[in-house]
Amino acid sequence: MTDATGKLLPGAKVTLSGPNLQGARTVVTGTDGVYRFPLTPAGSNYTIRVVAQDGGAEATGLGLEPWKTNSRDFTIKGAAAAGTVVEVLATATAISIDNTTTTDAKTYSGETLQSVPLASRDWSAAAFLAPSVVDGGRGTTNPNISGATAYENNYIVDGLNVTDPFLGTNNTRVNALAIESVQIQTGGYEPEYGRATGGVISVVTKSGSNDFHADAEFTFRPKSGIAKASAQTKLPFSSARTAAGDQSTTAFWLGGPIIKDALWYSLGIALNQSANTTSYGQSYLLDPDQAFNNPLARPSTSAELGGLTNSGTSYDLKTNSLDLTGKITYSINSSNTLEFSFNRNRLTTDNNILGLTAKEYESTYKNHQDLDIYSLNWRSVITPSWLVDVRAGTYNRKGFSDITAQYNLPFVGVSSAPFSLSGQMQPDGATPLFPGNIATSRANPGFSMGGNGGAGQNELGRKQLSIKGTNFIGDHTIKYGADYDETRFKSTSGYTGDFTVTRTIRINGLTGAPNYFGDTYRFRRGTGGVDIMNAAGTAVVASNVLINGSLLTLDSKSKNLAYFIQDSWQIHPRLLVIAGLRFDSQKLYGGDGQEYLTFKTKDMTAPRLGLTYDPWGDGKTKLLASFGRFYETVPMDLNQRAGSVEGFATFTSPRSTTAFAQDPANFYTVPSVNNIFDSNHHLQPGYALSRNIGGSKTDIDPAIKPQSIEEIAFGVERQVSPLVKVGAKWKYRYYKNVIEDFSFDFGSNYVIGNPGQRGKGLEPARVQDYDFPGQDEYVSFPKPRRDYRELVLSVDKARGGDAWTLSATLTFAINEGNFAGLDSPLNGQSDPNISSTYDLPVLMRNTYGILPNSPRYNFQLNGSYDLGHGFSTSARYSYRAGTAISALGPDLGAIYGPLSSPASPYYTYEGQFLHEGNYGNNEALLEPRGSRGTTPDVSRLDFHLEWVSALPLARKSKVTLFVDVFNVFNQQMALTVNQAKESQAQVVGAESTITGAIVPGGETTTGYVSLPNPRFLQPTSFQAPRSLQLGARFSF
């Protein structure tokens, strides 16, 4: 506060009032002319009134944004009478530069999100309005931010961490009408924020007010409003495709006073309904001898059909969700506020179909996801210079399925996926691409019957407590605090019918021998199971096998504790230095309740440093620089899979000499446990144990370090007019350490540690050369790298006296390395910190290159225009580069025959050496990562038009009618392509270099070869076609 001469003005009386404030607040400026209204709720239409000895001022219609310091400076000129407000000279402008932070963040109000054409009304979808955010293939609720993958973000609702503890995803829905504002932090976040190596997305829900307000909204996306697929997307398919059907949302929100200026309420409810259609093509099994009637197609009954078509059977998939959001705000007095908030989600999905299921074996069930979030917050102004914020809350999510006895059957999947080698057909749809003795192996089931496979339920929980304080001491603003977070994951799991079956047509290469099918039965193992003995009952072949409906229960937890302190020091009116530290610690407990992995505070010290400089001191320019280290909180997938004692036992069916396996009529049978074991748990004749997996935890490297990234950023912002600002920011992110599991003995034993650190990976492992038997290669585990460099150019224009707004960003990014992150975009694996990326030394070939996490360039343009007469419009346009393409292939494992002896028999098939098989398809990079170019550039235009009219029903009531058009020009470019250059195929009856070499059982050696994939680089998904959304909103 200054007077007419620019001199600081102490002792001025400043009053703040507004609809989001429970009672007016009054403060007096200090000797430095500064006034503060701490812990003020975000909102619009605030009024600041100043009364000083020499005059006064008043500014109305002010908006206060959350998560930032909102500055409003005043100059008081002399008045005719002391204390009289005669002139408004608030220096706030419609667009401003925030010189109090180096955080890279964007904030959007709930009203803004309602007027922007967002394809998803979910709060986290607002992140795509910000630069540095792209779709990484995990849906609009889990974006890729600043070069990271979808599992590296932190999600916050009303100050409470709602990140899913198991994978690190977002599963929380918030009624769009109940949203006050959303913030997306893409980098440079302060010590208060942690547990993320991507971004931080926060939402604040509405509070009540002294006046009653209500909204009711209905939106509808008709199936008839979806454009037809273009010719280029009409590729023959034999897997499932889902087409969007009718979708609708009915939402309500209301808020008001229970006791004016003391007790307010806010309540929102939304019902979301959708009916998508899933269509299934046909699956082929190669059968040269015709013993199984080639081709075996996906039938509508058990009768076999021929021909490859696009008209497989279709099913409706109905989804219903109910979202309830509420808040109670109690003003104890002018210095203390107590707030209780909750968010409840109920999601039910009907008619789930697994695989290409025969009609009479259709597996239908209901899937349920229930989520409950509760939070209690106390905010206090202890003194004008000391603020306290305390919050406690819980997060609980449960997932389960309703499975009737009718479908409590083993899941039987035929290992001949439509896109596996044996399913590949010539363009005529009838001629196999690969005739000969080839059958599929380890492919995803392409034809299935029986039950749905999974049984049981998952329960995830989070308990939180945080205490934060802020002190204003001279030129210092000091923030500090601590937060405790305890997560739990309890799973009760098993299989419908006790086991699953993988069924494969086997091609017998012996002359005159009939073809047959082979079954592999997979059972869970765990405490309370039974011991399986051989046929004679003399020896245990597998222990603790779960049968008769028994389920495996694992109950793991993690404890996370963090402290932080930060000092924002205004060294000079133009220079602000922000220095802070965050100290995290984490303890992981396995499914048996025992401590498994611990990181202490000294292991997780994260410095944060930033500065801002205003070169001309007019508040219109900001130069910034920042550095930060950010630690990952290990998701609980590791607790369950690596830190728990669980396992599997698999058994194989009778050999090909049995009549049962040679009879095609038995192909459609769904076996029961009695086919495998007798009542005494003895294996039936001919059955044998093939694998006994698990039974121990994965070892931890004693010198393991937590996973973290570091970030360096520089930027500039300039307000070029009261309504326009421009900016440029450069950012560099890189891994400091990565946690992964790896094996030096080809998968027999694993260790969890930091690849490339402490000698791990520095000593090369001896691996076989796949092309030249007897010649070794030496491959080590390199240090994981993800080097992300980004330059963002921006222009923002606010609405002033004119009718339009604009926000434009152009992002240039390079993302290079050998490790994408917690998500695995190449093979689709969702196992953070224990993926297959570093499992074997042989998989380290060609791993460095361009990562697919981020496009090279991304242009975004958002704008709105007031047409007058109640009409307004807004649009979003984006144009981005495609993502990097790699050439993937199988990890075939070792070549048959000991390499130590040159005289050993090497089995071959059509010139290729036969391999034992190991990790299967899409695990190895056959060429340097990202060297196959990129997918096509993608552009999209979304459009919003609305009409607002006042209603005579009540004061300030209005109706809004709107229409959204998504992908206006119906662009349908390919988003992803098939990156499998080669695929693994199983061969029975391969020739040996030693004539007449036969293995026991009357068969020649069975092994694996790698064959070209004819669908390499062919599109696998496209942009969604043009669609329409209609809506109406009533506000009171």
Image (spheres, rainbow, N blue to C red):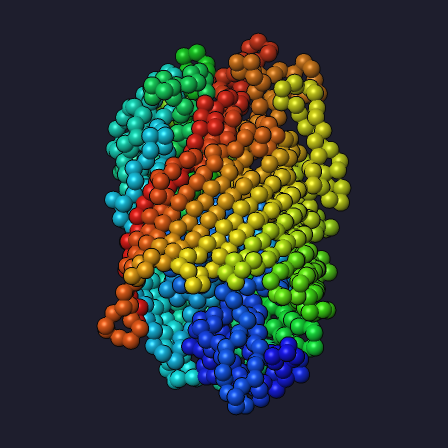
Is residue 10 found left or right of 255 in the rendered image? Answer: right
Which one is in front, 649 or 286?
286
Nearest to the observer: residue 865 or residue 136: 865
Q: Is residue 36 visible?
A: no
Q: Residue furthest top?
A: 995
Q: Nearer the viewer, residue 198 or 663?
A: 198
Residue 957 in the image: state x and y as whole percent: 29, 71
Is residue 792 shown above or below 190?
Answer: above
- In the image, residue 645 above or below residue 383: above
Asked whether the viewer can see residue 564, the reply is yes
Locate residue 111 relative to residue 574 in the image: left or right: left
Residues 877 and 407: in front is: 877
Q: Residue furthest bottom?
A: 81
Residue 821: x %, y % from top left: 59, 45
Q: Quadrant of the N terminus?
A: bottom right
For image coordinates 42% across by 49% down, the residue present is 876
- x then y, percent, for residue 676: 42, 37
Q: Quadrant of residue 911?
A: top right
Task: Specify the quadrant of the image occupied by residue 774.
Answer: top right
